[in-house]
Every structure is written in C-alpha cells, then in structure tokens.
Image (spheres, helix red, strand yellow):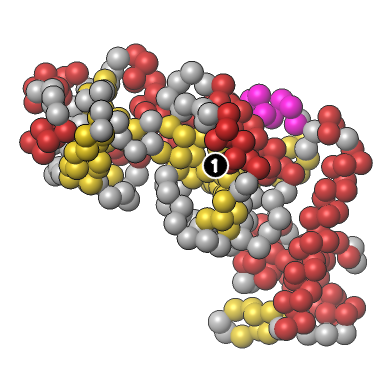
Amino acid sequence: MDRLQAMAAFVRVVETGSFSGAARQIGVGQPAISKTIAQLEDRLQVRLLVRSTHGLTPTDAGLRFYERAKTAIHEADEAELEARGAGAGLTGQLRVSAATTFARLLVVPRLPEFLARHPDLEIDIVLDDRVIDLVSEGVDVSLRMGQLSDSSAVARRLARGRRSVIATPAYLEQAGVPAVPAELASHEAIVYSQLENNWIFRKDGTEASVAIRGRVRVSAAEGIRAAVLADMGLTVNSDWMFAPELESGAVVRVLKDWELPPVDLWAVFPTGRLASAKARAFADFVETATRQSDGPMPRLSKNKASAAIDRPEIVIT
C-alpha cells in the first residue's frame, strides 16, 4: 500500500463524508477506497472513522491524522513541483468552479493559453451560479463575483469591474431613455433574484437610492442576458456580462454619468486546505488576464492589486 495515496484517500473520505464521494473524486471504485482505509487502520492500529447509517465521522485520532495528512500531501506536491523546476509546468487535474456566464465569456476563451503553458495539466470546470461547497465538490479554486460575507476560507481579490444600467436600443426606443436614476422606477427591469436590487447611484457628491422592479426575476445570469437581448427590459449588472454586446452596440449603457458600486472578482480556496500550486497558478493567470484586458473588467490599481495579493482576506466559501 502506498502511504501517500492512502493518506490522500483518507483525506477525501473525511472531506466528502463517504467512501463513494471519495471514490468519485479520485476516479476509482468504492470497494478500493474502503479497502484502502481498512488497510490504513490496520497499519496504524487505531480506528480512524466511525461508520453509521448517517455516514462517516472521524474519531479523535482520525481528526488528528487528517490534519497531519493534509499537510503532508501538500508538502509532497510542493516538493515535486520544486524538484521539476518552475519552467516544467504543472501536472494532474485542477478542478475550478465559476459562474456560468463569467466562465463562458471571460475564462474559457483564455484557457488555450494557460493549457499551452502546462501541457500535462487537465482542467475540470464546474459551472454553477450558486455558491457550492468547495470541499465536498473537490474544488481547488472557485472564481466568485460580488461580496463574500463570512470568515471561513481564504480568498484573494483578483479584479474589480464596473456595473452599469444596460438595455437594448430597441427597448429604449420604446420605453424612453432614463435621464436620472429615479426614472428607473417607471421602467421594466430584469431582476437578478440572487442580489438585492436596491442600488445607490453617485454623481458629484450626490447620492440617489433606487429600487428596481420588474415582472421578470431570473436566478441565473444567462437568463438575464436572454431577457435583456429580447428587449424585455433594462438591467443593473456587470459590464462583463454583456461584453460582446457592449462592443458591438447590441446593448448600450444608460445613466453613464452616474456611478454604481463596483463588483469584485475573487479566487476562493477551500476551507482548511492549503492552496495548491495549481490553484495559485490559475488564480494568477486569471488575475493577469483581467488586468491586461481593455474590456469590461478593469484592472485594480497597482496599490490595490498588491494589497489583494500580499494580504489575502478571510472570507466565506
């Protein structure tokens, strides 16, 4: 039995709470995982897991072994990368989660460059607009937009983007172009149900608070795009969500002289696990790509970018 592989299997069992969950992540059958854990317990002469109808729970000894095993696995991975040299590239699988529309527009088109740098690396992308549990899903790094409000995982801000009031020319021709934020109350809005839709507009020291409302509420960004492009109403959203259409003129910004709160892009790493070299490299790549872009995701200022990298914030997963 390979000790490091057995430790890795045990860590996955604890994090997923089941043999079957660990087996899916590792890519082996459930009996193989069960046998590995039994052999590990025999070797250590201690019970690591308590089995019940509710799942698997680590014993006190199992929790202590889990923490040490995670550290050992991380150190082994880093040692291999160090031995190969920085120019040799990354290997294995990297599991990334991201919101569907953001990934489709700004991540996936840039993947060829990242993969060309690391020909032995495989990327598994989980697309979901919801906040998922990174540990149970086996995610190495998650790209998330907006506010992060808890304090259980390490996250790094990669970029800051602009929010705008966006609509099609056809909708504005029919409904009129709002001249001040208060006029949004008389417009049909496509509402993102996962956000509060009370917005603070600022201009020359003046603030205007507006609650946008509409008959259409959508739980995913793709639906908002589809509704706006069907001339059903305007929306308050990130410029990146409509990047191609803003460039082509299919949609336009209104109230451009009023400022809305910006939206942040974060790289979030799983709770209780050191970020792998692969996860850090991918976060660096996305950060660099958004900084180099002249499009809808403006780069952080030099000072802000350095602060985001050098002093990671503690935020929710």
| Residue closer to the observer: 62 or 303 | 303
Give x and y (percent) for residue 110: 58, 26
Give x and y (percent) for residue 184: 14, 35
Range covered by the magenta-colored residues: 111-118
| Residue closer to the observer: 18 or 304 | 304
Give x and y (percent) for residue 225: 31, 33
CA neighbours of label 1 inside 10 A, class few (<14), some (14 to 19), many (20+): many
Instruction: Identify the residue at horizontal 44%, vertical 56% (top origin).
Output: 149
For residue 220, say whether it is visible.
yes
Give x and y (percent) for residue 157: 54, 42
Q: Main secondary structure of the magenta part?
A: helix
For residue 227, say whether it is visible.
no
Instruction: Identify the residue at horizontal 73%, vertical 37% (top origin).
Output: 121
In the picture, the quarter occupied by the N terminus is: bottom right
Residue 289 relative to residue 144: left or right: right
Residue 305 relative to residue 42: left or right: left
Q: Circle 1 is placed at which residue position?
A: 157
Q: Is residue 131 above or below residue 306?
A: below
Quick check: is 119 in the magenta stretch? no
Instruction: Identify the residue at horizontal 87%, vertical 42% (top origin).
Output: 82
